[in-house]
Amino acid sequence: MSKRCMLSLVIAGVSLAASSAAAQTVGDPRNPIFRNIYTADPSAHVWADGRLYVYPSHDIAPPRGADLMDEYHVYSTNDMVNWVDHGEILRASNVPWGRPEGGFMWAPDVAYKNGIYYFYFPHPSGTDWNNTWKIGVATSTQPAANFTVQGYIQGLESLIDPAVFVDDDGQAYLYYGGGGIAKGGKLKANMMEIDGQMQTMQGLVDFHEASWVHKRNGLYYLSYSDNYDQNGDHNRMRYATSTSPLGPWTYRGIYIDSTDSYTNHGSIVEYKGQWYAFYHTSMLSGNDWLRSVSVDKLYYNNDGTIQLVQQTKQHGTPHFTTPLAIPGKIQAEDYDNGGQGVAYSDGSPQNEGGAYRPNEGVDVGAIPSGGFHVGWLSTSEWVEYTVNVATSGTYTVSARVATQTANGSSLRILFDGKKVGTLAVPNTGEWQTYTTVSTQVNLVAGKHILQLRFGDAFNLDDLTFTKQ
């Protein structure tokens, strides 16, 4: 590993042909906010024109993991409801020193200084992508167009996820990392060279990737994604604080729980007096690698700690007009009306089984002995049901399931976005050989949204809730 990062950028002056793309109004006031393409890793900033801009990465469909990510777009808003897609500003083929095969345009960030916008992006320089990452820089006098590639910051390690924070005194800092390594250091005034040495960020707990730094009331916050991977849930967003932009840091906790995506990556920004947390989910696609940017309000406690962000989304309506009753049996195929990203998230556009509700995306097959099952499941997929809980208390929830998956699977149970239980799904030997698995959950009386998040490859016939 290189310990000194004092070298300058190389390969200057490559302009981007795609920067002239006309802006188009897209987006949605409900999550996820961008629906014209798949977007992830949102970097949000407020610039002098009074608009909030989001610089995400772009998941190309059909995906091949994260390999094909390319063609960065920029979005902006002046009211957090109506969004403009300013079009593409950079693609792999515009990077002369980049990987010959293209792709691998991962999470970017942008900084502004002295009339120039600096777009920082990770991209490999060789076919051996994992060992040849560079932090590229493109510049423009506009926040969402006419960027020109200036080269890459020499002397850095092969790491990803650049984030640049400009302090009140004008000093800029670069943060990057990955694979449990988190580093930060000063940038020179030209925003294109490291000033001194990059330092390992001290005091972080379970760092994975996705550094982001913001400042509030004189306190610096470093947020990041962790390594959490249990019972079908994945990365969460943690944060730490410091009185210095380079630490040492004091770990504070988790501010975003796992989403329905395998990854988590976000940013925190204040706009018109309200703080916001940007992140991504897979609710539009049901695919871990076709993600979509979401945003929710973020709140601080009086001591400066961050409250857990309440992830929001639009919900559907009951399939049979009225909420399903708890206690009682819920047939898996009786999920809410509302469609993809609202009542369910399914990775294939068609109903693979076609045995029930054939014009919708949830895969429903017939059970030989009678009835239907929801099947062809994969991680990131979910369905929702509007339910009414008769009385508060402890309930046994039993699921009738079947799978040939060697190591079984899992079923996570959420009420109003909060996980209340997880069921382990064992290998039953055959796809139509069903068994019943149970757990206990504590429920509150009233109307709720029950969400079921699936692990890989099993069939679900029904759930039964029994009051204890």
Image: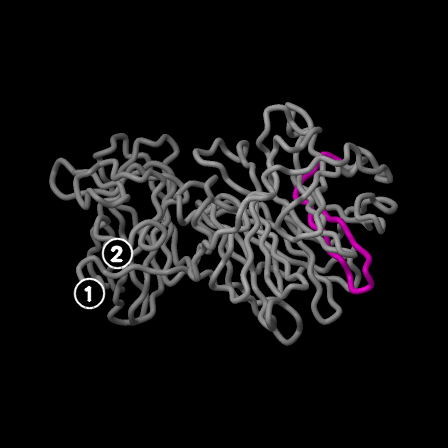
Would residue 455 be counted in the magenta stretch?
A: no
In the image, 28 versus 367, the foreground residue is: 28
Task: Judge from the rendering whether residue 32 lies leftward or rightward of residue 140; answer left or right.
Answer: left
Task: Name the residue located 29 percent from the left edge and 59 percent from the top edge.
Answer: 316
How many callouts does the rendering have? 2
Answer with the quarter of the image where residue 4 lies.
top right
The percent coordinates of residue 212 (x first, y second) are: 66, 54
Q: Which residue is mark 1?
A: 322
Quarter of the image with the N terminus is: top right
Residue carrying label 2: 336
**Which image quadrant for residue 444?**
bottom left
Mark 1 and mark 2 in contact? Answer it, CB < 8 Å: no
Residue found at the very far bottom of the displayed protein:
302
Q: Residue 208 location, x and y as percent?
A: 63, 45
Spatial CA distance of label 1 from label 2 is 10 Å
State which quarter of the image contains the C terminus: bottom left
Q: Is residue 20 visible?
A: yes
Residue 332 vs residue 218, the one in the foreground: 218
Q: Residue at x 27, y 61 (%)?
A: 386
**SS under mark 2:** loop
Q: Secondary structure at mark 1?
A: loop
Q: Which residues are magenta?
A: 157-175
Percent x, y of residue 415: 36, 61
Tell me if residue 282 comes above or below residue 48 in the rendering: above
**Counting residues from the N terminus, which is met first, the one under dot 1 or under dot 2?**
1
Residue 228 visible? The answer is no
Q: Residues within 10 Å of mark 2 (few under 14, many from 20)?
A: many
Q: Position of residue 249 (x, y in %)?
A: 74, 58
Q: Is residue 26 left or right of residue 352?
A: right
Q: In front here: 347 or 87?
A: 87
Q: Please rate how many residues cluster around mark 1, counting C-alpha atoms within 10 Å: few if below 14, some from 14 to 19, many from 20.
A: few
Please, what is the three-letter code of the amino acid marked with disc 1? Thr
